[in-house]
Amino acid sequence: MGAGVDVYDFINQTTVLISMILLLLVFIEAFQMKTHNRRIRFYMSTVAICLGGLMFNIIYQEKFAYVMYSLVMPTFTLYFIETERDDNEGWDGLFWMSLQFLISILVIVLVTYGGGYLAECIAFLTQYVVVTVMLLISAKQLSASFSFLISLIFPIIAVFAEMIDWDVKVLGLGVSLMLLIVFFGYQTDMERELMENRVELSENKVSLLMEQIHPHFIYNALQQIALLSDEDPTQVKPAILSFSSYLRKNFEALTNEKLIPFEKELEHVDAYVKLSEVLPSRNFTVKKDFKVTDFNIPALTLQPLVENAIYYGIGMSEEGDEIRIETKEEKGYIVISVSDDGHGKKTEISTQKKHKSVGTANVKARLKLLCDGELEINKSSNGTSSIIRMPKDRVITEKNEKK
């Protein structure tokens, strides 16, 4: 019997060691990813907890190992919730989280006070069944969650194996294999999302072209330049240069799927402001307060917001004449705000509202696709404020950080 136990110990320790090596490699790979969003952070936390359990197995502290394994499912549930949250925030992930934590507490109590090995296995099995039910009920698409479902087979098999023979300690291996498959599924998801983003970005260009370079604006600009040739010939050349620069920046942006320096986008803004000053409209001033400029930004994101502030902020208001463009760094984000002090009765017609809304939608799409940024628009009686937030690690290159 002693020889048999020694064989079991050798097999168990070998499987634990192999599991640790595999998970460490996965952890290092996940850590080196450029984007550390909440989803991948939850995954890394789950791996770290599992590694802790494997470590306790190595030093023959099985009770502590099973306590750690019981905490894997709650953090795994957080990972799944974050996976689904982007497009489906309607389901209540708090219910599943609470249920998993309650089962974890039950396992801890059973392990601590000697509730019996069979009871512990049943509690673990309940955790995996709950996760399976969660996947079947709450997944956006079962096909997209196929890797999740497949991965759960391994810890379930491991639990049954330990129930049949208590000397077999393979729960850590089962959980490790589950996490390995989930990671490969995560990488597949990222590749699929990248392809979808590229397609969406290409489709977005057509809409952007039609809305950004709208014929009405071009007609008004050319007409006003023609009038300047009679009223003030000295202003014709600067007006044509501004108009040319504005068009060139738009066409360049439409062919650019990468981030550009903030200064380049600011040149586009300045060209548009100069051109707007030529057109017949209310007088306005643009004030700038830049606390940070050494970062990148998707093209055609700041200029449309300034356009909205000029023509749909102060331009469609009875009061206000100032537009402010500000940048700052805040809590790991680069924040850009465009605000106007226009207020009073708005007189936008339906076509103007449509143009503004489509332009804003294009800005949101480009921010999300190119740098995982967000656009927030706040309206009040004192004017409108458009705020761009971009993750610092996505828009500041290593070269910029050294400056």
Image: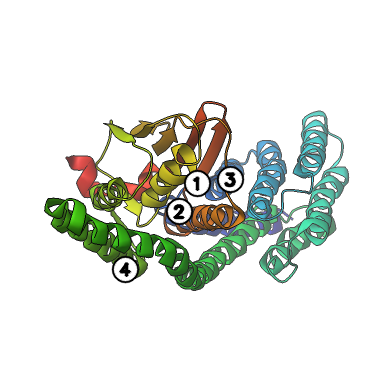
Please say if 265 is above or below 49.
Answer: below
Q: Is residue 135 left or right of residue 334?
A: right
Identify which amino acid the numbered label 4 is placed on. Phe
Q: Is residue 250 visible?
A: yes
Residue receiving disc 3: 42
Instruction: Give the mark nearest the N terminus, 4 or 1.
Output: 4
Instruction: Give the mark nearest the N terminus, 2 or 3.
Output: 3
Q: Nearer the viewer, residue 279 or 392?
A: 279
Instruction: Give the mark nearest the N terminus, 2 or 4.
Output: 4
Residue receiving disc 2: 367
Instruction: Give the mark nearest the N terminus, 2 or 1.
Output: 2
Q: CA distance from mark 2 to mark 1?
A: 6 Å
Q: Secondary structure at mark 3?
A: helix
Q: CA distance from mark 3 to mark 4?
A: 41 Å
- Asked whether the residues under the numbered discs 4 and 1 touch, taking CB atoms below 8 Å apart as contact, a structural biologist would say no
Identify which amino acid the numbered label 2 is placed on. Leu
* Residue 226 in the image, given as x and y percentages of width and height: 25, 62
* Residue 1 in the image, given as x and y percentages of width and height: 74, 56
Instruction: Give the mark toward the camera: 2 or 4.
Output: 4
- Asked whether the residues under the numbered discs 2 and 1 touch, taking CB atoms below 8 Å apart as contact, a structural biologist would say yes
* Residue 120 in the image, given as x and y percentages of width and height: 82, 43
